[in-house]
Structures are given as C-alpha cells and as structure tokens.
Amino acid sequence: EPEVTQTPSHQVTQMGQEVILRCVPISNHLYFYWYRQILGQKVEFLVSFYNNEISEKSEIFDDQFSVERPDGSNFTLKIRSTKLEDSAMYFCASSGAGGGNTIYFGEGSWLTVV
Amino acid sequence: KQEVTQIPAALSVPEGENLVLNCSFTDSAIYNLQWFRQDPGKGLTSLLLIQSSQREQTSGRLNASLDKSSGRSTLYIAASQPGDSATYLCAANTYSGGGADGLTFGKGTHLIIQP
C-alpha cells in the first residue's frame, strides 16, 4: 500500500541551527501538508501546499519556516534558527484532493532542539 | 476558528466490550471529519473519513457517525480487543474556500483495553 515516508526519524540539533525535514508523499497525490505535535499536546496544522505554492498556513508557520518541493517526489520543511520550543514530532501528509479526500500521514520526524 | 473537543480523555475497559468515543466541533462548515489512530511515538493511521453529506461510515468493527447540525461525531468500536489500545484522534476539515485546508485535531481519547 502506498505510504508517506519521512526522514530523518529523529534529529537532535543545537539551538540556532537550521534543520531540513524531508518527506516523500504518495506518488499521485496533489496536496501536501506539514503538521507538528509537541509532546502531550494536540496535532497542529502548519502549512498546506498545492501546485507548487503554499495554499494555507497557520499562525505557527512564521518566517522561521519554509517549504519546498525541489523535485517531483520530495517535499521539505526547513526550520531556520531553531528554538527550544520547536522540539516536536513533525508529520508530513498528503492527499489526492483538497477538501474531500482522506489525508495520509507519515510516521513523523522527531526533532529535539538542545 | 474551529475547535475540536474529545471526550473522554482516557478510557479503560475490559476486552470484549463495545464502546463509544465522542468528538464535538464548533464550526459546522466542514468538508469532512476523519478519525485516526495513533500508537505511542508513531504516526497517524486513518481509520474512517465521513464526508459532510454523510451520516456514518463503517469499517470492520468500527462505525463513525456524523451530525453536522449539532457539531458531533462518534466512533463506535465493537467487541474491543487489546490490540485496539491506542489514542484515537478526531479531526475536522473545515471549509474556508482554499481547497487545501488543514485539519483541526482534538486532543484524543487514550484507550486501554484490558485483556
């Protein structure tokens, strides 16, 4: 069964460093998303991406964050100058259409900022 | 702004029981509602998707219902098994015209099925 894959599964980084989290969405999907889950808290929407541009973003997704689809298969989340409070599980997701289809999630990338 | 609430926060029942998990949402302008399962330290597994025009969806021992007018959804699990132990998340996909809107999640119900 097709799945969303994410790398790395776990990354530890120094505060202030840049981090890139990578995702390979399901191959025929058109909509891509990043979510995060701080330990013990709700899963929170960060950004959605369609047709090579951001479709929607939350208040969390500020100038520190950026997304890119550098080629036909990868979808990346870049966090510039990481802060302690960026420590969280970051989930990539994809769907075949925007509003009506099931959104499929990857296993997550656990980011620890020290 | 959409808010999703799940009750109870935790539930522990003996194996074999039928159980109901509750989800409520404040904005009824939703595309759909999805139920997910999350195992500790893992990703989210989609269980059921109910479109806004539907009343319920079934998959195996799971049945999810949706009442848009009252802002409620329930997940019914029949004949529970220890392998059903996980956190169950409800998420509303709210229409805002953009077509690729993010899901709004509840905090989840942490379910333990005792063997």
Image (cartoon, coloured by chain):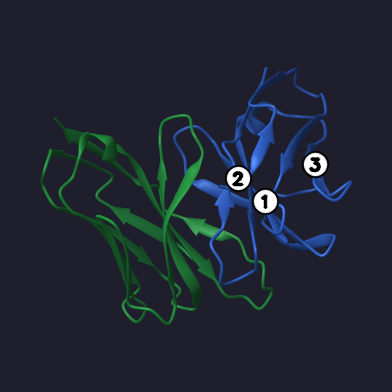
SS at mark 1 in the image: loop
Name the colour assigned to chain B in the rendering. Answer: green
Location of mark 1 (residue):
A26
Q: Residue at x 33, y 54 (%)?
A: B6
Name the colour assigned to chain A in the rendering. Answer: blue
Cα–Cα span, label 3 and label 2: 28 Å
Earlier sequence position, callout 3 versus callout 2: 2
Q: Residues within 10 Å of mark 2 (few under 14, many from 20)?
A: some
Residue A63 in percent (x, y) is at 82, 47
Which is in the foreground here, disc 3 or disc 1?
A: 1
Location of mark 3 (residue):
A64
Is residue B33 in view?
A: yes
Earlier sequence position, callout 3 versus callout 1: 1
Q: Which mark is residue A3?
A: 2
Residue B28 in percent (x, y) is at 44, 77
Q: Chain of mark 2?
A: A
Q: Amino acid at mark 2?
A: Glu
Callouts 3 and 1 close, C-beta under 8 Å: no
Q: Which residue is at the front of the view, B96 or A73?
A: A73
Quarter of the image with the C terminus of chain B is top left
Picture layout, residue B57 above or below residue B39: below
Cα–Cα span, label 3 and label 1: 27 Å
Q: Residue at x 80, y 24 (%)?
A: A16
Picture layout, residue A70 above or below residue A95: above
Picture layout, residue A16 above or below residue A36: above
